[in-house]
Image: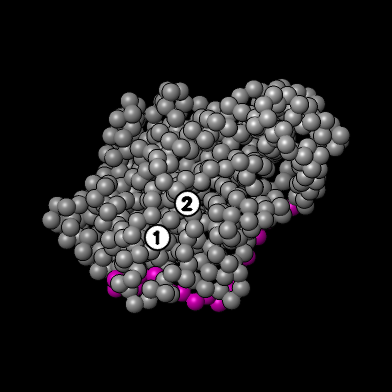
Amino acid sequence: MPVIPTSINLFQTYQDLHQFLFNCQQTLTDKMQTKIISISLEILPVDPLAILAEICEPHQLHFYLEKQIIGEKNLHKNSLAIAAIDAATHLTVKSGNRFVQAQSFIQSCLNNTISLGATHLPYAGLHFFCSFTFFDKHTQANLNNLHQNGNYAQQLSINPHFPSATIFLPQWQITQTNNRNILVINTVINNSINIEHISQKVWYKFQQITQINHTHLLTLTTPYKKLRKINVNHLQEFKKSVASALDLINSNSLRKIVLAHAIDIYSQTNFDLIKSLNNLRLIYPDCYILSTSNGNGQNFICASPERLISINNNQLVTDALAGSAPRGKTPSEDAKLANSLLCSEKDLREHQFVIDFIIKRLQDLGLKPNYSSQPHLLQLSNIQHLWTPITAEISQNIHLLEILAELHPTPAVAGVPRDIAQEQIQNFETFDRSLYAAPIGWIDHQGNGEFAVGIRSALIDGDRARLYAGAGIVSGSKPDKELAEVQLKFQTLLKALV
């Protein structure tokens, strides 16, 4: 991928931009040849969520991420926010090895890109935004279960339309980190494209972005909608599924399985994506706040506490996150619940399943993982988890997507043994998981990237939304307690959707 360092501001005048893109087109020697032109520059401070609200259209792909970054020695925190809007080019995968196809697509783009501008800045250059559904292909099992349910027509009223994999290079990427804002503009040119039309479009959108009101969305929007809630799988059916799963565990067919529950909610008016995301980032600042779309009006959002994988300068970090308890209403009650979680044989066993799985998968790739022998507590506003970060140094010949393919799904969202657990999940659950508990994240041109797990999530489709939550079932689990756990997790989105 050629990188052209330049001090020339291509956006000083429209003529400079037009001339540059015209010159790029003239270098194309083959009639069928295409090039991706990637321009990075620093702009004045602006909230990426405000830009998402201003320039993104419902039919366009988008990706939004916000999270806190722990500073040196945990002494301070910085926030990272990324908005990626519209696709310069994209790939959707319906069948085949989706991770291999995604890697091939990314490499093909890198081989045909010219990068220029402030490429030395963090989050400059090409970034590919990705979402993978929980299951790699659609199966008949869920539809069979739906047909057996008398409420079949009602349950199909919200039908997710996300392909097995979506990878896109955005036309517009705005990143805010360390009090700096980096804008990346990607455009595809070929010999037949109208350079004047492309130049005008890019110039107009750039002017629009730099003139957006830079005030941040700083206040919560109180949920005011009167919502109608319908359990996709009825409460008693969920508890029966837990009991049946326990029978499989007691017969040694399984050691763990994660069963999800879903509720559909209906509003008198359309849900507001931007205000809902703003609520999530204000209420849950320690989570990954994510949103991604399918370009057909459906948006998947979540406030996930779980990192699946992060790679930065050949350093890998992944999380074992399993075992949960509510937060206390008083400091003494909170401490008692935390101590009980740290000493819970059932939760520690469930947590160890995840650690053992991740360690083995990383070792199978030739990596040498490091982790603490005792789990930490990850305490969120309404729930706390057992948490063990796992690190490893990776070589440059291992791609992030190769590791992702090995790790997804972990026992934290599937079970042990994994293949049997996934098969049983499709027997028990009467809805499509889609992006629930699936990898959502980004990869840059250097192989760095970060993926979270799409839990504490909702699929928004106009005035309808489907909320997802799950619970890990192991020996010693109680159906009533597992139902209480998923209902607690539903509150994450119910407190934020407007």
Circle 2 crowding by C-alpha within 10 Å: few under 14, some 14–19, many from 20: some
Please, is residue 247 above or below residue 190 in the view? below
* Measured Cα–Cα span from mark 1 to mark 2: 12 Å
On residue 432, the disc is: 1
Residue 18: in sight, yes or no? yes
Q: How many marks?
A: 2
- Image quarter of residue 113: top right
Residue 223: in sight, yes or no? no
Please, is residue 53 above or below residue 186 in the view? below
Extreme-left residue of the structure: 251
Element at label 1: loop
Residue visible at 67% across and 36% down in the picture: 188
Element at label 2: loop
Marks 1 and 2 in Cβ contact (< 8 Å): no
Q: Position of residue 28 (x, y in %)?
A: 70, 26
Q: Position of residue 142 (x, y in %)?
A: 34, 62
Residue visible at 43% across and 23% down in the picture: 397
Tag 2 or tag 1, which sits nearer the N-term? 2
Q: Disc 2 marks which amino acid?
A: Pro
Which residues, given as a range, are shown in magenta?
215-237
On residue 163, the disc is: 2
Q: Nearer the viewer, residue 426 or 95?
A: 95
Q: Main secondary structure of the magenta part?
A: loop
Circle 1 crowding by C-alpha within 10 Å: few under 14, some 14–19, many from 20: many
Q: Position of residue 253 (x, y in %)?
A: 16, 52
Q: Disc 1 marks which amino acid?
A: Asp
Please, is residue 27 above or below residue 70 in the view? above
Q: Nearer the viewer, residue 83 or 318?
A: 83
Is residue 218 found inside the magenta-colored segment of the image?
Answer: yes
Q: Nearer the viewer, residue 332 or 77?
A: 77
Foreground mark, 1 or 2, reads 2
- Quadrant of the rendering where the N terminus is positioned: top right
